[in-house]
Image: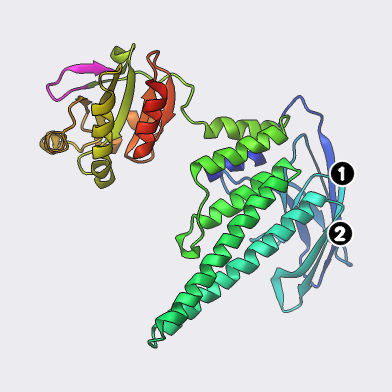
Amino acid sequence: MIAAVALISSCESKKTAVKKFVVSGTISNNPAKIIYLEEIPMTTMQRIVVDSAVLDNAGKYELKTGSADARVYNIRLDQNNYPLASVINDAEKITLNAKFNKENASYAESYDVTGSPASSQMKEYMVNFNNRLQSIYFNSKKADSLSKINTADSVLRGLEMNTMLLGAEIKNMTTAALRDSKNPALSMFVLGYYQSTASNPGYGLEPLTKEEVQKAVDDAVTKFPMHKGLAAIQATLQGWIGKEAPDFSLPDPNGKEIKLSSFRGKYVLVDFWASWCKPCRLENPNVVKAYNKFKDKNFTILGVSFDRPGQKDEWMKAIMNDNLTWTHVSDLLYWNSPLVPLYKIEGIPYNLLLDPSGKIIAESLRGEGLEKKLEEVLK
């Protein structure tokens, strides 16, 4: 999902006029000689330098580029791996001044951005976000130390509650920033910044669900309908829905080739699983329940197993033990099955719901969500 969000940094419209963008200012108390302007290529994490300049004796500089779309850029000094700051090109000219501590040339002691409302909002968001994240880190370290000296549970629970409160504040702050954003690059930066941090379980943040991410992107597209990068992100996040399922043919347990297209005329759930997959086995009762409820309403299931070579017996045993009374196929090639890249499968259990024409109308249906979707389409 974060890689998809990051597409905003590299998508542009060739039909839209390129707008000039100039960043200038002064860098104080830093020995750097060169300053760089970089697009943020979040998809590859390999920075794209679009301009550079030599800092004069007073630390002054000017950087220039052009873009058709709203973009996020890094300002980086020559000796540093990490950027000094990030800016957005919502104005033709912006000023960024930075002051360093003479004893630490790696990170700016302070910096200010003028002339760019979106850049200022991005800075404010990051400062507020990181201040709370730092508090979460200190709480974690303190709790770890206190637990080693048999501190009362009430004290530890107090730290835990404070951490949960800080996490909720960060999430609410992110939701508000997305709602109030007036720039598409800012919206996607905020979304990516939160999700990439929340993906680290050590911070204890609650990632946005797939549905929440989709809604955030959909809302941004509604607000900024002319932005080509957002449209590309939206299309990427929609995944398989609305597309025709690629056809394939695999053998059933008796060696008979079964084609997906042979199920045309029915609603079919293509269920990717394996006997060795514990989450799949735990999900199977939900699939069985849905099948028994809707099998007489023009609905069936095609089970596709990613069991390992030589483990046909384990596959058959799982089918019998879990009472999976529908059609099953497998090439017993584990993750080397050609269906893995064909359907871009990153993990199982995973499923796709096809309508009678073979078009995919839903994916990743789990638990009550599967039954609810079937009730919706099989009225």
Q: Which residues are magenta?
A: 251-259
* Residue type at numbered disc 2: Gly
Q: Nearer the viewer, residue 261 or 97?
A: 261
Is there a contact, CB below 8 Å, between mark 1 and mark 2?
no
Q: Residue at x 50, y 76 (%)?
A: 159
Disc assigned to residue 56: none
List x then y, in percent, for residue 190. Answer: 65, 50
List x then y, in percent, for residue 291. Answer: 26, 28
What residue is pinned by disc 2? 25
Q: Looking at the image, can residue 237 be seen?
A: yes
List x then y, in percent, for residue 357. Answer: 40, 13
Would you place residue 342 above or below residue 151 in this image? above
Q: Which corner quadrant of the image does residue 92 belong to? A: top right
What residue is pinned by disc 1? 92
Q: Is residue 316 magenta?
A: no
Q: Is residue 254 magenta?
A: yes
Q: Residues within 10 Å of mark 2 (few under 14, many from 20)?
A: some
**Of the image marks 1 and 2, the number of the one nearer the N terminus:** 2
Please count the marks in the image: 2
Q: Residue at x 30, y 31 (%)?
A: 271
Q: Nearer the viewer, residue 276 or 56?
A: 276
Q: Which corner quadrant of the image does residue 341 belong to? A: top left
Q: Residue at x 25, y 33 (%)?
A: 289
Q: Nearer the viewer, residue 4 or 157?
A: 157
354 with respect to 199 (left or right): left
Q: Disc 1 vs disc 2: which is toward the camera?
A: 1
Kindly state the secondary structure of the residue where label 1 is placed.
Answer: loop
List x then y, in percent, for residue 335. Answer: 29, 37
275 with respect to 219 (left or right): left
Q: Looking at the image, can residue 47 be seen?
A: no
